[in-house]
Amino acid sequence: MILDLAPAIIGALIGALFGGALTAWFSRQASKTSATAELLKDWHSPSMRTVRRLAKLACERKPEAGLVGNWDEASEQEQLAITVVAGFFDRISLLHKHRELNGAMLKSAFAGLIAFWVPLIVGQSNQSDAGEWRPLFNRLERLIAKTDSIGHPEAELYRTQQAGKASEESRSV
């Protein structure tokens, strides 16, 4: 009698384990998607748009110098804006490192932004004087590599625009 029920019990246990594992996996994927969507929502918030505008103005004074090279010339508001934007990408980097984000959605939504902003924040020089910023810069540089942002069209467009500005400035001097 008990032997007749054994296959049914084993089947029910296997089904419960498989169903539980599948439910946990789908829940995890939904959580990752939600976290990534929340980052996107934060990025496009009105307050972040204002912060981004200030940070971009400050970092574009000398784009090759990055955050460190532009810090002293930046106003207090611009310094705060640079810190907020750098912190935003640091948050992405840490969440990505700990596999808390939807990878495909991250690439789709943020690869161009990462390709544009990280070089602007880090700058093109070695920045041996980066001091306390060096760990952040290292994480951001790894983020570019992990999201395949290198060579992204938005980054190339930015570099082309910067080269055009530099040549215009040299002609006007």
Image (cartoon, rainbow, N blue to C red):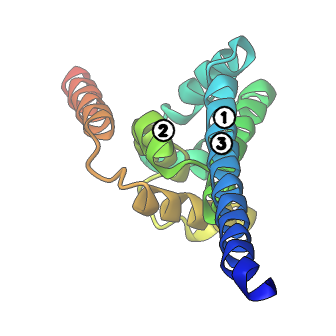
| Mark number displayed over residue 30 | 3
Q: Residue at x 44, y 46 (%)?
A: 104
Determine which residue is flagged by label 1. 39
Q: Quadrant of residue 40?
A: top right
Determine which residue is flagged by label 2. 110
Q: Earlier in the sequence, mark 2 or mark 3?
A: 3
Disc 3 crowd, CA 10 A, few/some/many (<14, 14-19, 20+): some
Q: Earlier in the sequence, mark 3 or mark 1?
A: 3
138 relative position to 16: left or right: left
Disc 1 crowd, CA 10 A, few/some/many (<14, 14-19, 20+): many
Can I make out residue 130 in this image? no
Disc 2 crowd, CA 10 A, few/some/many (<14, 14-19, 20+): many
Depicted 12 relative to depicted 160: above or below: below
User: Residue farthest to the top?
Assistant: 46
- Front-most of residues 33 and 113: 33
Three-letter code, disc 3: Ala
Q: Residue at x 65, y 42 (%)?
A: 30
Q: CA distance from mark 3 to mark 1?
A: 14 Å
Three-letter code, disc 2: Phe
Depicted 53 relative to depicted 85: above or below: above
Q: Nearer the viewer, mark 3 or mark 1?
A: 3
Looking at the image, do the residues carrying marks 2 and 1 touch, with CB atoms under 8 Å apart? yes
- Front-most of residues 128 and 10: 10
The quarter of the rendered structure image containing the C terminus is: top left
Can I make out residue 115 in this image? yes
Q: Nearer the viewer, mark 2 or mark 3?
A: 3
Q: CA distance from mark 2 to mark 3?
A: 18 Å
145 relative position to 164: left or right: right
Rendering coords of residue 87 (x, y %): 72, 45
Q: Residue at x 54, y 35 (%)?
A: 59
